[in-house]
Image: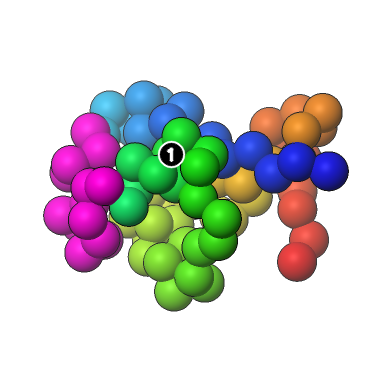
Amino acid sequence: MKIIVRLDELLARRKIRLNQLAEMVGISETNLSILKTGKAKAIRFSTLEAICQALECEPGDILDIEGRSSNATIHL
């Protein structure tokens, strides 16, 4: 099972640049870029929560499982 990060899709839909989100969330642009490209090995719940608040979304909008539609809900 592979987890897919859909952060780039959310940013595009909301017309927000990565550097803007980094400033809103208080995370380095480099760390957000690692997350966005799917190269992150982990994400803190507090970081995920901050991103969700900034983008007005839920964790399932950012994280998906390969092979599922992007509208699927992920239960943690």
Residue marked by disc 1: 36
Q: Looking at this rendering, what residue extends furthest in the bottom direction? A: 46
Q: Residue 25, how many percent across, how many down?
A: 26, 61
- Using the rendered image of the protein, determine whether residue 10 is visible from the camera's viewpoint: no
Does 21 lie within the magenta span?
yes
Q: Is residue 70 left or right of residue 36?
A: right
Please rate how many residues cluster around mark 1, counting C-alpha atoms within 10 Å: few if below 14, some from 14 to 19, many from 20: some
Which quadrant of the figure contains the N terminus?
top right
Q: Residue at x 78, y 61 (%)?
A: 75
Q: Residue at x 21, y 64 (%)?
A: 26
Q: Quadrant of residue 54?
A: bottom left
- Using the rendered image of the protein, determine whether residue 5 is visible from the camera's viewpoint: yes
Q: Residue 73, how many percent across, how many down?
A: 75, 48
Give the answer, above or below, for where 63 lies relative to 48: above
Does 29 lie within the magenta span?
yes
Q: Residue at x 44, y 74 (%)?
A: 46
Give the answer, above or below, for where 50 lies relative to 67: below
> Amino acid type of disc 1?
Lys
Magenta region, mostly helix, strand or loop? helix
Q: Quadrant of residue 53?
A: bottom left
Which quadrant of the figure contains the C terminus?
bottom right
Q: Residue 45, how many percent across, how many down?
A: 52, 72
Q: Residue at x 17, y 44 (%)?
A: 20
Q: Secondary structure at mark 1?
A: helix
Judge by depth and name the residue closer to the eye, 37 or 55.
37
Please report the bounds of the magenta region as a residue range: 17-30
Give the answer, above or below, for where 3 lies relative to 26: above
Judge by depth and name the residue closer to the eye, 38 or 52.
38
